[in-house]
Amino acid sequence: MPATEPELRLYCFIDALGWELAQQHRFLESLLPHRGPLGTLLGYSSTCDPTILTGCWPREHGHFSFFYYDPQGSPLAWLRHLKWLPRSLTSRGRVRHWISRLAGRVLGYTGYFQLYNVPFPFLQFLNYSEKRDIYQPGGINGGQSTFLDLWRQRGVRFHLSDWRRSEAENLRALAADIEGPTPPTRAYLYLAAMDAILHRDGCSAPSVAQKLKGYEQQLLQLLDTAGRRYRRVQFCLFSDHGMRDVRRCLDLRTPLERLPLVYGRDYVAVLDSTLARFWFLHDGARSQLLDWLSQQKHGQILSDAQLAAWGCDFPGQKYGQTWFLADPGVLLCPGHLGERPLAAMHGYHPDDPPGVGFFGCNQPMELPTHLTELYPLFCEGL
Amino acid sequence: MQLTCQQIESVFIVQLPKGALDAATSKDFRAAVEPLLEGKTRVVLDFQEVSFVDSAGLGVLLTLLRRLAQQQGDLKVCGLSKGVKTLFQLVRMNRIVESFETVEEAVRAFACH
């Protein structure tokens, strides 16, 4: 087939491909000679991905972590009845996953919905932030348009991966679209499996090197396919954050439960993997919890100035009145995100070098240096 | 690891070898450079040939900074590639160590203080 199409702009997102990891493995070095570190945000993919899509800071797009205190508006209260199920059953990841799928369907959510390890009785105090699919129109909590919305408005013929499908399916779907009767002029390829491998095996595991080799082969093959259809292919590859090996687990849950305070009456907390976020329901609980938190080692209470500098000063302190951030390499476990330790984690101080993301391109360009700078790139040429 | 060094007036300049200052090379670099810094107070690290620095490399830089501070000395860096410069900015290393385009500028900066 002759290269009849003028140009494809292919944007490839690889979850958790850090700058350090990419450089250490010389990942796609010859294909992506124009490359550099990409600054990340405080938080997780649930924070970063809306920023990639909109160019906005978290305080603007309103996404951070999945759970936040909202007892009046909680759509999850009915799930508290599941507390009667045996813990031996509901503590299993697979069981929680299926309960989440079912609950998500009942609630009519189109976004990524997971109950993780949040105890069922606590859910009546919490709301969920990613109810809608952020890749579809109206998916961003702050109401901003994404670059995909702009592509839609401008009538761009584009291909978008489906985050619910496997990487192999998404790669096949894009290749088929490229070879099909109406090839896209822009494509957003979503590859998410690296994140899970790093969490499970750690940054130095052979499986990580193997995965990167696999990506290289798959992407080179895809570009070969594109090269036969298009006269010019601009290929940009980037990540939302990096990853670092876990060196220690910090159990905040057990000592928190031992305090003479009651969840839902005195305070509400969400124990993410690297952040513990608190809402105080009266002044006594505030002083007691702040005193307790200030005694914790292996982490720090974040100041308002830090949260503001990182764009996480949410209106109404939506995601917590006090945030405790674990030191790099410290995993808050057991917690509300997981019961068992992981080999690697992200979501530490945004300046932590292994957490820095990656950006690379096959053509010379002014390289973006922060996640907030990707959006204009997606809108170029429209 | 063999390092190329020179002295310009009171400033000691160490040229880092070509390649990466990362998990694979930073231990060797530290072992090679530390003895050279004994008694020195004004040091410039020339990154002209360095294409990549990771957290292990940054860790060695912080160690050297601490060591020099203990002997009332200071460290400056020069010749950072675009990628390394961006990383320094992203992880706020540029607030801890002063960076210059050339060895001459770094040496001049010492003379000004």
Image (cartoon, helix red, strand yellow):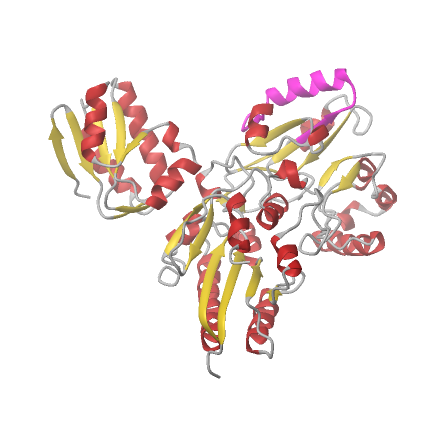
Closer-to-camera residue (A10/A288): A10
Q: Quadrant of the C terminus of chain B?
A: top left
Q: Could you tell me residue A22's position as x and y percent?
A: 42, 53
Is residue B57 left or right of A166 when viewed as pictured? left
Asked if A118 appears above or below A259 in the picture, the reply is: below
Closer-to-camera residue (A186/A62): A186
Q: Give me the residue at 60% from left, 24% from top.
A: A304
Residue found farthest to the bottom: A1
Q: Could you tell me residue B2's position as x and y percent?
A: 16, 43
Closer-to-camera residue (B109/A255): B109
Asked if A259 appears above or below A65 in the picture, the reply is: above
Query: Magenta span has A300?
Result: yes
Q: Could you tell me residue A273's position as x and y percent?
A: 62, 40
Closer-to-camera residue (B72/A156): A156
Q: Could you tell me residue A235's position as x and y percent?
A: 46, 62
Query: Magenta span has A128?
Result: no
Q: Give me the residue at 22% from left, 36% from top.
A: B102
Q: In which quarter of the image is the N terminus of chain B?
A: top left
Question: Is residue A15 shown to the viewer in this render?
Answer: yes
Is residue A231 left or right of A277 when viewed as pictured? left
Is residue B54 left or right of A293 when viewed as pictured? left
Tally of numbered discs: 0
Residues drawn in magenta = A277-302
Question: Is residue B53 shown to the viewer in this render?
Answer: no
Q: Give me the residue at 82% from left, 25% from top.
A: A265
Image quadrant where residue A260 sits:
top right
Q: Give me the residue at 83% from left, 51% from top.
A: A107
Is residue B51 left or right of B14 when viewed as pictured? right
Image quadrant where residue A340 sits:
top right
Asked if A263 appears above or below A226 in the picture, the reply is: above
